[in-house]
Amino acid sequence: MPMQAAAQAQPNIALIKYWGKRDERLNVPAVPSLSITLESLWTRTQVRFDETLGEDRFMLDGKRDDAQFQRVSAMLERLRHHAGVSTFADVRSFNNFPTGAGLASSASGFAALVVAAIHALGLVLPLAELSALARQGSASAARSIFGGFVEMACGSRDDGQDAIARPLLAASSWPLEVAVAITAPGPKSIGSSMGMVHTARTSPFYRGWIEDAPRRLEVAREAVIARDFERLAEVSEASCLAMHGLALSASPGLLYWNGVTVELMHCVRELRSAGTPVFFTVDAGPQLKAVCLPGWSRDVAQCLAEVPGVREVRLSGLGDGARVLESK
Ligand code: DP6
């Protein structure tokens, strides 16, 4: 009889960025990170282990996805190994937002996959273990196992098992809001995995980035615990700009922004100078995420939507971690 389950996970946005791997094979980050898990964007994934299948299958948004198939199948292989089974699986995943465009679809995708597959296999694992498994698919996915404010360690063990996320503060304790301005819907030019490996190999500033990471994380953690928005704004924008500065300093340089992204950054800074509690962050793509204090996201979204070239602005609160939706 097929074993199946479905799970939902939401993307998270790193305020303190992960960029660089301590171990490429085990996918262990070189720096710690801190994120917020979103509420209104989601990935829903259904996994069915079926003995009649001769290989794994993966469909994303109703289409076969050959580009991501290897990563998904490698993850299923790890999970099979964990459960001591050899049955292939049919995986169907849906995103309610553009995939691969710097909106952290790999984070919600691998978190949902791990939670659904582990449940389908009849295993019950501690969240820390789910986080370690998700990390092997995509390090940011380790953070989407949890909701609210999440901290991710890079650890020091050779086997990478201490590179896991942990919850820092519940979403309800400081319900920040996010306006996501979409400037281009297509997939990003160079994926983050490849981009960060390329950066580590070619940027003369990579070492400085790694050395400064613990300090940035500590400032952000303290700001979150103290609900100090100004401090969080300052360190988050600094982390984002340092990450992009680092990527730009690779050879050849990686430029994830378009002109609209830059206009949006100016817009957010002007709003802040005029007293609106908002800051920006941008991942490996041209979309800008504006993070603001509760009650401000509609006004902020309206201003962002007026920047020429912005296609859509989506609003989100902070949400929960990955969870099982149903099981049969
Ligand atoms: C810019 O987690 O997608 O979004 O571990 O190689 O899958 P892999 O990378 P991924 O990288 C995320 C990079 C980032 C910053 C962040 O989310 O911390």
Image: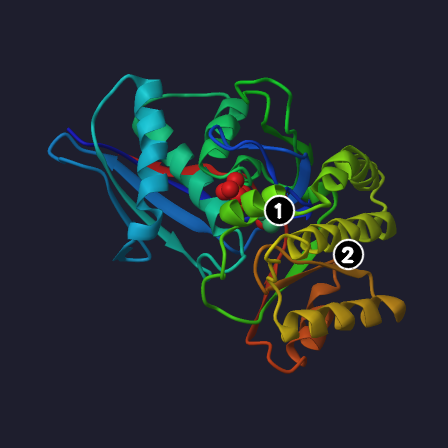
Where on the picture, by quarter, is residue 152?
top right
Give the left or right position of residue 259, taking residue 90 as reference: right
SS at badge 1: helix
Disc 2 + disc 1, Cβ < 8 Å: no
Residue position for label 1? 202
Which image quadrant shows ligand 1? Answer: top right
118 w.r.t. 302: above or below: above
SS at badge 2: loop
Depth check: 225 or 184 in front? Answer: 184
Depth check: 139 or 60 in front? Answer: 139
Where on the picture, by quarter, is residue 169?
top right
Q: How crowded is mark 2: few (under 14 residues within 10 Å), some or many (20 or more)?
A: some
Q: How crowded is mark 1: few (under 14 residues within 10 Å), some or many (20 or more)?
A: some
Q: Can residue 170 be seen in this view?
A: no
| Residue at 52 percent of width and 26 percent of height | 127
In the rendered structure, which amino acid carries the disc numbered 2? Answer: Leu
Residue position for label 2? 293
- Whether ligand 1 has any atom under 8 Å from the Cβ at mark 1 is answered as no
Q: Where is residue 325 in the image (x, y as percent from the top left)?
A: 39, 40
| Residue at 60 percent of width and 76 percent of height | 310
Q: Where is residue 160 in the image (x, y as percent from the top left)?
A: 55, 22
In the rendered structure, which amino acid carries the disc numbered 1? Answer: Thr
Q: Where is residue 104 in the image (x, y as percent from the top left)?
A: 53, 51
